[in-house]
Image (cartoon, grey):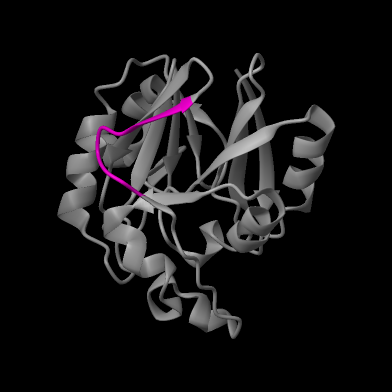
């Protein structure tokens, strides 16, 4: 399994391209801005984009979805609880940019769903709090945490749909992962579960 990170959009979202080296099946997580770099990587590696997976529905994580889908034909998947957010510029906050974004999901995800790339299985964990339909995506020692968990911090809950109690419950779930699990967040540097359990003040 190979992984490439891209930093896209005004809010510097970490967008990830993950692919199986044998089948060249790929998934893109949170294409948050113009996806030209992602498209170049897909073309150079001769990848087949099988999924566009959204960890949640805020505008900074969906800004490049429509263009990426148009160029690749890949279906868009988001948790059912954020389906209304990606289709509503007021809820995904893109109305604040004066360039509203509307994304129509092709697949609605639920906790425990599994997405396959070749022989690799990506498991969906529903981790609400930052948004009602926030998810994390896990596979073989890696955790893509969206805006639920950051290096040294956690997702904010003061935006529409935020829920502090739900976030705390989600974090309790994430700290059950092995300490060596590598965490790739929606913003900022990567980390590990062990490092966050030791140093993140929100996990004390």
User: In percent of the image, x 46 and y 65: which residue is there?
Assistant: 104
Task: For residue 4, say whether it is visible.
Answer: yes
Residue 113 lies in the magenta-colored region: yes
User: In percent of the image, x 33 and y 15: which residue is there?
Assistant: 178
Image spot of residue 189 (x, y percent)? 57, 37
The region drawn magenta spans 108-116
Residue placed most toward the observer, 200 or 82: 82
Residue 111 lies in the magenta-colored region: yes
Q: Quadrant of the N terminus?
A: top right
* Tally of numbered discs: 0
Residue placed most toward the observer, 14 or 16: 16
Task: For residue 131, say whether it is visible.
Answer: no
* Left or right: 37 in relation to 152: right
User: In percent of the image, x 38 and y 29: which residue is there?
Assistant: 196
Image spot of residue 190 (x, y percent)? 54, 32
Q: Quadrant of the C terminus?
A: top left
Image spot of residue 54 (x, y percent)? 46, 49
* Left or right: 35 in relation to 104: right
The answer to whether residue 16 is above or below residue 32 is above
* Left or right: 144 in relation to 42: left
| Quadrant assignment, res 43 | top right
């Amino acid at each position: 399994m190979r992984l490439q990170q891209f930093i896209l959009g005004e809010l510097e979202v970490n967008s990830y391209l993950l692919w199986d080296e044998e089948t060249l099946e790929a998934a893109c997580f949170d294409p948050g801005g113009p996806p030209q770099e992602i498209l170049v990587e897909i073309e150079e590696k001769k990848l087949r984009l099988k999924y566009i997976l959204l960890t949640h529905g805020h505008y900074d994580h969906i800004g490049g979805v429509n263009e990426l889908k148009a160029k690749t034909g890949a279906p868009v998947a988001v948790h059912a609880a954020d389906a209304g957010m990606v289709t509503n510029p007021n809820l995904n906050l893109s109305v604040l940019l004066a360039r509203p974004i509307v994304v129509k999901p092709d697949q609605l995800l639920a906790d425990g769903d599994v997405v396959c790339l070749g022989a690799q299985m990506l498991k969906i964990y529903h981790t609400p709090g930052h948004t009602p339909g926030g998810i994390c995506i896990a596979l073989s020692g890696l955790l893509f945490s969206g805006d639920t968990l950051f290096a040294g911090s956690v997702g904010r809950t003061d935006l529409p749909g935020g829920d502090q109690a739900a976030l705390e419950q989600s974090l309790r779930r994430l700290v059950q992962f092995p300490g060596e699990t590598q965490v790739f967040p929606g913003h900022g540097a990567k980390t590990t579960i062990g490092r966050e359990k030791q140093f993140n003040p929100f996990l004390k």
